Amino acid sequence: MRIEKVEGLLIGSDLLGANYVVRITTDTGIVGIGQSGTWGFPDATQKVVDQYATWLVGQDPLRIEFIQSYLYRMRPFRGNIVSGALSAIDIALWDIKGKHYQAPVWDLLGGKVRDKVRLHLLLAGGNPDEIRKNAKIAAEDGYTALKYDPLQAGYQDQSLARLIEGARDMAAAAREAVGLDVDLIFELHRKLTPMQGIAVAEALAEFRPLFIEDPIQIDSIVLQGELAKRFTFPLANGERMNTIWEFRDMLTAGGPQYVRPDLGVAGGITQVKKIAAVAESFHSALVTHNFQGPLITAAAIHVDVSITNFITQEFLALDESPRPADAVYRTACKRVGGYIPTPDCIGHGVTLDEEMLGKAQPVYMPTNSLVKLDGSPALAV
Ligand SMILES: [Mg+2]
């Protein structure tokens, strides 16, 4: 079997404007698809894939480890755009391998460790009343873990006291609504300085979160790791990290903490399986990241099923949206309550609906940043 064609598809997304998907066609007629998580710069990812494609055509698609290593070592450059392109290609190649062997990807990764994958729902809501209402609905729908941002609008200009009390009000709202048997995750979205992050996290500890996520910007891997030492309860980091080496550096700096590789950023299925092993050696566990929709969700589910050190999988209600942008994807990963049962599928189980593809036109996100009242750039998502 040989790779015959490598195509990039920009697909409209209700949340992000555009998703970047790679479609690889082989000379046997088997087709695989994969997605990049580098949603901020889809065109840049396309350019890297185009360059890789000139070598990929003619290669044996079953040699996934060789292909990824060959492409990664092609030039001495690293970062999200390169790893995002590699991730999309890797996920497509695993899809092809599964179809070739008529097996689910999770079976090729070592087999099933669990019968179902626990989800944490990304909860909408900008004030305590909305959080209270939405948390109750989600818990009644069967979710056992909920995640939301407790910082309220205008956080970038608030006093530390107001910032902390506003976050406590948000945290209390969900805890009141769901009691003690649903896990809460507080997502700080990289909006705080280390000094603010520690103060806010300490104030939120009384609400017993499963973990607190991304209190600070991603600029320093070492500092992200070191913050874990300062916290008295779990911290989770790493949704923008690219390689096993970056995860190793963070865990070395901070010791056990939850790690959040994104299948579309961290090198696809091949590398996230390795990141799980690196994390396991630190007695750490994975909370796989995704807010891009069904294709990345499915790629993550296959890894989640095949590893022992897994906690929860991020999930969006948009994955079940009837709107054209998300109806493009037909997936074998169907939610039942707060879980996705291990999918009985061939490959990763996601295909594209060609008719809907034409209706999901990509749009570009606005080119802007959040600024503070004094005009300076704020720390933001
Ligand atoms: Mg996050």
Image: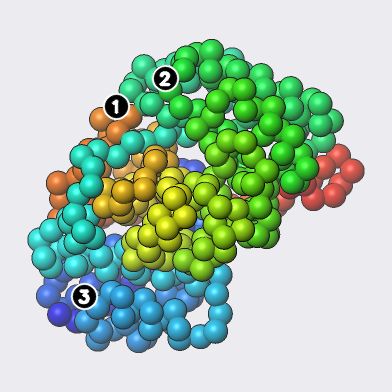
Q: Position of residue 165 (x, y in %)?
A: 74, 22
Give, as a three-letter code, the residue at label 2. Answer: Asp
Q: Badge 1 local density, few (<14 within 10 Å), some, or many (20+)? A: some
- Is residue 60 visible in the rendered image? The answer is yes
The residue to which callout 3 is attached is: 62
Q: Position of residue 360 (x, y in %)?
A: 39, 50
The mark closer to the camera, 2 or 3, is: 2
Q: Badge 2 local density, few (<14 within 10 Å), some, or many (20+)? A: few
The numbered disc on residue 181 is 2
Q: Is residue 304 above or below residue 272?
A: above
Query: Residue at the location (19% across, 61% down)?
Result: 108
Q: Quadrant of the N terminus?
A: bottom left
Distance (Cα) linking label 1 and label 3: 35 Å
Closer to the camera in the image, 79 or 292: 79
Give, as a three-letter code, the residue at label 1. Answer: Gly
Local secondary structure at mark 2: loop
Residue 276 horizontal side relative to residue 133, left or right? left
Residue 246 lies in quadrant: bottom right
Q: Position of residue 157 (x, y in %)?
A: 82, 35
Closer to the camera in the image, 322 or 269: 269
Distance (Cα) linking label 2 and label 3: 44 Å
The residue to which callout 1 is attached is: 337
